[in-house]
Amino acid sequence: MRVLALGGSGGMGRFAVETSMQFENISEIFVADINADAAIAFSNTMNEKVSGFGLDITDSDSLRKAMEDTDIVINTVGPFFKYGPPILEAAIETGCHYLDINDDWEPTLEMLKFHKKAESLSKTAILGMGASPGLTNMLGAAAIQELDEVETLYTGWTMDGATPEKESSQSGINAAMIHAVQQMTGKVRIHDDGAPKMVRPLKQVVVDFPGYGEFKSRIFGHPEAITFPHHFQSLKRSMNLAHGSGFGVLKWIMRLVDWKILSVEKAAGIVQNLSSSIREDLEAKGVETGINMVRNSLDDPPSLYALAIGNKDGQKASCGTTFRASDLISMGEATGIPLACGLKLLIDGKITKFGVFAPEGAIDPNDFFKALHEISDLFEENEEIGPEDLKLINFFRSWL
């Protein structure tokens, strides 16, 4: 299989490429970046399967020509509200399978509309195969399997440690920071009372998590809130929630954007500088930085989790899922490695559906976590809790 890695030398894409080049069923990986020198320099540090070249993804003819020589496109070029839909459409029309790390709900809705087109051409597209969305979707799918009926699904993550990678081909304001501002301002879409609703982000929500008790989190505009009801139509309530230590400052910055005092770009620059400064200060003090995949302290909510609420054996029940991990990992690792895992499942024939899906719509969580354990040593196996292929995660069941 030949893979085209759009943005493959960026802060997220480089981890996907570095992991994927080890797969036996991949013969070549073409790393494409607007910065040709960066793509080539990065590729030269990888194995013989990887080569780099310059590509402007806004040049449709050049983009499609690059896709014609490949079997699968992995896309880490953001912001996805700008680039996601046209890249997916080009991939389908040139006969490529597709995976990305799309974390915007608006283009996710638009891209899901390509389902019938992809299905008719026997192509598979997986949207949001990163951390959140991505890992959270698989945690949610695992939690749903534990219940007989599910009415509510929360996915959640911590913003602490979510800072741009130091090594990246991207200069200027990071696309992830622009995305973050977009999803903390204006209104975002959730699913409540069995229907889509537009609400203000950062509204507080109380989560009652088995084994942890109650904690407060905030509504964020990630696409899990809309993709779970898309694939599990019995859901009455679905939200993506974020928590962390810096929401007091963030809320004021976002208000200035809503009041049109700050532009999205300027606000993203401020957030990026703040997060980078915090990381530099901590590193100067000898403190490790990154995302703890379990939680940062015993008083904190899980760093990455899903919570399914519904019924089991005729009784009200809930099941929470979290990672069992031992190492701090970067935002790039937490995003790029799951993308590589999704790629492996696709090339190994574990994803058999054609069309456009979020991860929970096409990937068996048992297959996913088994593959994740095989390709990464960042996640520690739990021998005591969970089905055979789900030993990377902890289950917190209200009925036990």
Image (cartoon, grey):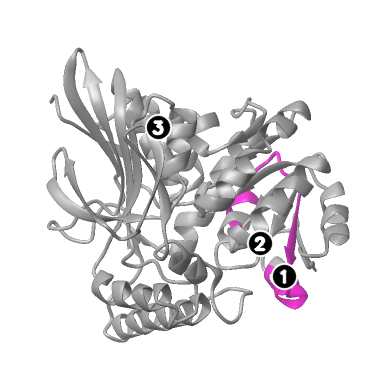
Give whichever of 108, 278 is nearer the camera: 108
Figure check: 69 above or below 261: above
* Quadrant location, the N terminus: top right
The amino acid beneath tag 1 is Ala
Cα gap from disc 1 to disc 2, whole angstroms: 7 Å
Marks 3, 2: nearer the viewer: 3
Q: Residues within 10 Å of mark 2 (few under 14, many from 20)?
A: many
SS at mark 3 in the image: helix
- The residue tagged 3 is 141
- The residue tagged 2 is 8
Q: Which x, y percent locates residue 163?
A: 42, 71
Cα gap from disc 3 to disc 2, whole angstroms: 28 Å
Which label's residue is closer to the chain start, 1 or 2? 2
Figure check: 88 above or below 147: below
- The residue tagged 1 is 39
SS at mark 1 in the image: helix
Residue 175: give its label: none
Give whichever of 163, 179 is nearer the camera: 179
Specify the segment rendered in magenta: 18-42
Q: Is residue 166 magenta?
A: no
Figure check: 225 above or below 6: above
